[in-house]
Amino acid sequence: MHNLTKLRTHFDAGDLTGAIICPAPLEPGPAPCWIVIVKRQNGQQLVLKKDRAEQGQWRERIFKSLDAAFAACESIGFIQAKVIRK
């Protein structure tokens, strides 16, 4: 589980190197939805998850706007994020 609190702890420890905002896969609708992926020092990529488990599973946090996704990146500690549009 990698929610905002846990990722903020990783950021404060210097473990995160960057943030990527990209389209959420398989999300219906005409407007794009977004997910946040963060990169660790060891090259691993972590997807931001919701704060609460749904039916015992931790699901990706889906954002309806780029502004909301970037606000999440800022709350982790990033001052910039790469946006990828597909």
Image (cartoon, rainbow, N blue to C red):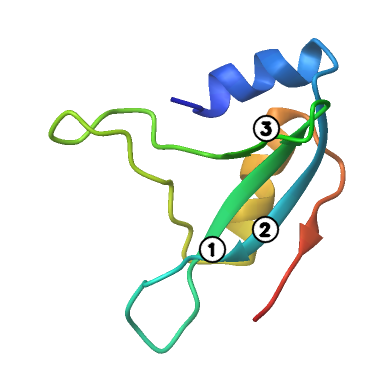
**Residue 10 vertical position relative to residue 54 in the rendered view, above or below:** above
Amino acid beneath label 3: Ser
Amino acid beneath label 1: Trp
Amino acid beneath label 2: Ile
Mark 1 Cα-neighbour bin, 10 Å: few <14, some 14–19, many ≥20: many
Q: Give the spatial CA distance, label 2 vs label 1.
A: 6 Å
- The quadrant the C terminus occupies is bottom right
Provide the secondary structure element on which disc 2 rests: strand
Pick whichever, 55 or 33, lies toward us. Answer: 55
Of badges 3 and 2, the one in the foreground is 2
Mark 3 Cα-neighbour bin, 10 Å: few <14, some 14–19, many ≥20: few
For the point 57% across and 18% down, the residue is 6
For the point 55% across and 28% down, the residue is 4
Residue 59: image location, x then y, percent: 34, 42
Residue 34 lies left or right of residue 17; in this view the side is: left
For the point 48% across and 58% down, the residue is 63
Which residue is label 3 attached to? 75
Residue sticking out furthest to the bottom: 30
Q: Give the spatial CA distance, label 3 vs label 2.
A: 14 Å
Residue 51 quadrant = top left
Provide the secondary structure element on which disc 1 rests: strand
Which residue is label 2 attached to? 21
Q: Earlier in the sequence, mark 2 or mark 1?
A: 2
Residue 66 quadrant = bottom right
**Residue 4 vertical position relative to residue 49 in the rendered view, above or below:** above
Q: Which label is found at residue 34?
A: 1
